[in-house]
């Protein structure tokens, strides 16, 4: 096992990795920008290294500084977390060239899946079903002809990158040129690569992904699925496992397809193969070759592969009983992954809600400010992964994710009930959050029945009105503001964990 690991990330994922390192007896090195000099992850690490100004390009995206920081601190491995440089093949190669271990897949594997156009071509060759579409297009005429052949609506998307960046839905030919220009500009800014591809847009799709895991000895398995269809602006907000849509037969089919995808690039470590699934009949779609595609209840198509640890990995951990970060480090250090596919099973049901500092009633705009109160819920079957504490500042520099709230229970219905209770108990004052929004989503018949597509938020649950805060919430918020002294939030009541504390159940307040 490694002696010391530099974590090339920030926030909750940096803390998640630090805890795994501590359990394995590994020392940790945090990195931080000017905006993060007092962040929680810097305080929990054994060492912390300043890497630059707040803009990511000057700090968390500066590969040379990160690698040099690892060398200067005498770390022997680098864990990239997710986001930032986690799927940057040049960074992974640079870490290895410096004599350090990159805790993740090889640079070649990252490179193979980093280009969405090339990865689709590779998947087709490997027998993995892909969305009908075209890659390698250059001119507007090329895109126009391709879109006409596929049939509207189509999706114009960045050939490099992911996370919803550089994507535009085009419903008719008159929208195509502007969509291409916008997608190209966004792709260039986000990934430094303006290339685009076009594919059929499946309006009522479900987003189901398969966790894969492999070691350097050729062992490769899947760790089942995560249902990720509840999204806003192509970004997930609620994930769960098992998916309420999958039959055992479809689960096995998708799992094997994910393994085939990973084998095609000699994959090791943690990765996720993402698919879109259409659960209702549809008319035939035409591919460029003239082949007809029929969507039916078991239709699924390769979307992309994330060559890193996913944000939503905790739901897989809870239903499988495996610690993915532990195993990431252990296989990176050369250990064999000891489980065969038949050894792995799903137990119970897990749901994750991403708690964001954002305003769902105002286009999900980020909310910034100081956290006057931040009291996560506790209790059986409840897990909270967060990089914040009361008194911390939520800035505009980084993703507004405050915490990941994860619950586990014996059944899906029990998990939904547990999540609603946990959301009720999550107290945040100082910024607007999506807590009330997610609780309302869980209350809908659509969610209870598993009838949530990737367009559900915008088409079925977009017109949402936040509830008015009750008197107790207003008083709690006022007290939190009053007792905030000297840049630190002091508890309004001496024992906030006391179950009889009247402020414990105040709910969350939108200011």
Image (tube, grey):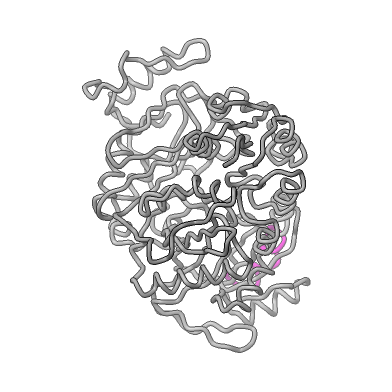
- Residue at image coords 33%, 61%: 450
**Position in image of residue 194 (x %, y %):** 75, 59
Instruction: Identify whether 294 is placed above or below 194.
Output: below
**Position in image of residue 130 (x %, y %):** 56, 74
Q: Quarter of the image containing the C terminus? A: top left
Badge count: 0
Q: Quarter of the image containing the N terminus? A: top right
- Residue at image coords 46%, 61%: 454
Compared across the picture, whether 268 is left or right of 211 comes to: right
Instruction: Identify whether 51 is placed above or below 341.
Output: above
Compared across the picture, whether 440 is left or right of 202 comes to: left
* Residue 165 forms part of the magenta stretch: no
Is residue 463 visible to us here?
no
**Position in image of residue 176 (x %, y %):** 67, 68
- Residue at image coords 47%, 83%: 294
Give the quadrant of residue 289. Answer: bottom right
Span highlighted in magenta in the image: 171-183
Instruction: Identify whether 490 is placed above or below 427.
Output: above
In depth, the one of 143 and 338 nearer the eye is 338
In depth, the one of 375 and 469 nearer the eye is 375
State the predominant SS element of the stretch in magenta: helix
**Position in image of residue 469 (x %, y %):** 32, 31
In depth, the one of 260 and 189 nearer the eye is 260
Give the quadrant of residue 48. Answer: top right
Is residue 414 visible to us here?
yes
Instruction: Identify whether 248 is placed above or below 323.
Output: below
Which residue ends up furthest to the top in the rendered image?
A: 486
């Amino acid at each position: 096992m490694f002696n010391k690991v530099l974590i090339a990330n920030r926030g909750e994922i940096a803390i998640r990795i630090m805890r795994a390192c501590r359990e394995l007896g590994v020392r940790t090195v945090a990195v931080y920008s000017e905006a993060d000099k007092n962040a929680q992850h810097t305080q929990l690490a054994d060492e912390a290294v300043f890497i630059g100004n707040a803009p990511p390009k000057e700090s968390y995206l500066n590969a040379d500084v990160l690698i040099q920081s690892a060398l200067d601190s005498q770390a022997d491995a680098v864990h990239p977390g997710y986001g930032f440089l986690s799927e940057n093949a040049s960074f992974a190669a640079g870490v290895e060239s410096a004599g350090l271990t990159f805790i993740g897949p090889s640079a070649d594997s990252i490179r193979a899946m980093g280009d969405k156009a090339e990865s689709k071509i590779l998947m087709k060759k490997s027998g993995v079903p892909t969305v009908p579409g075209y890659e390698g297009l250059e001119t507007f005429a090329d895109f126009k002809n391709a879109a006409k052949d596929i049939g509207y609506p189509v999706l114009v998307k960045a050939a490099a990158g992911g996370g919803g960046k550089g994507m535009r839905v085009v419903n008719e030919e008159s929208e195509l040129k502007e969509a291409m220009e916008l997608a190209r500009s966004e792709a260039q800014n986000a990934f430094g690569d303006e290339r685009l591809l076009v594919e059929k847009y499946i309006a009522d799709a479900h987003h189901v992904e398969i966790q894969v895991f492999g070691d350097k000895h050729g062992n490769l398995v899947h760790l089942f699925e995560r249902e990720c269809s509840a999204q806003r602006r192509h970004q997930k907000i609620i994930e769960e496992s098992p998916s309420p849509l999958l039959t055992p037969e479809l689960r096995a089919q998708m799992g094997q397809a994910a393994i085939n995808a990973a084998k095609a690039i000699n994959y090791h470590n943690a990765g996720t193969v993402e698919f879109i699934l259409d659960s209702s009949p549809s008319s035939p779609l035409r591919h460029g070759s003239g082949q007809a595609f029929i969507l039916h209840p078991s239709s699924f198509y390769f979307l992309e592969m994330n060559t890193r640890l996913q944000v939503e990995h905790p739901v897989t951990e809870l239903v499988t009983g495996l610690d993915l970060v532990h195993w990431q480090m252990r296989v990176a250090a050369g250990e064999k992954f000891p489980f065969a596919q038949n050894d792995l099973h799903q137990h119970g049901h897990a749901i994750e809600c991403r708690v964001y500092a954002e305003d769902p009633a105002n286009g999900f705009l980020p909310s910034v400010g100081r956290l006057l109160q931040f009291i996560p819920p506790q209790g059986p079957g409840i897990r909270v992964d967060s990089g914040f504490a009361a008194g911390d500042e939520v800035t505009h520099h980084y993703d507004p994710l405050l915490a990941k709230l994860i619950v586990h229970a014996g059944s899906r219905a029990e998990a939904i009930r547990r999540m609603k209770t946990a959301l009720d108990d999550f107290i945040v004052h100082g910024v607007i959050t999506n807590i009330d929004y997610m609780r309302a989503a869980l209350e809908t018949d659509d969610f209870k029945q598993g009838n949530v597509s990737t367009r559900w938020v915008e088409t079925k649950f977009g017109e949402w009105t936040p509830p008015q805060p009750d008197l107790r919430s207003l008083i709690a918020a006022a007290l939190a503001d009053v007792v905030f002294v000297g840049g630190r939030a002091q508890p309004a009541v001496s024992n906030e964990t006391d179950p009889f504390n009247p402020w414990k159940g105040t709910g969350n307040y939108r200011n």
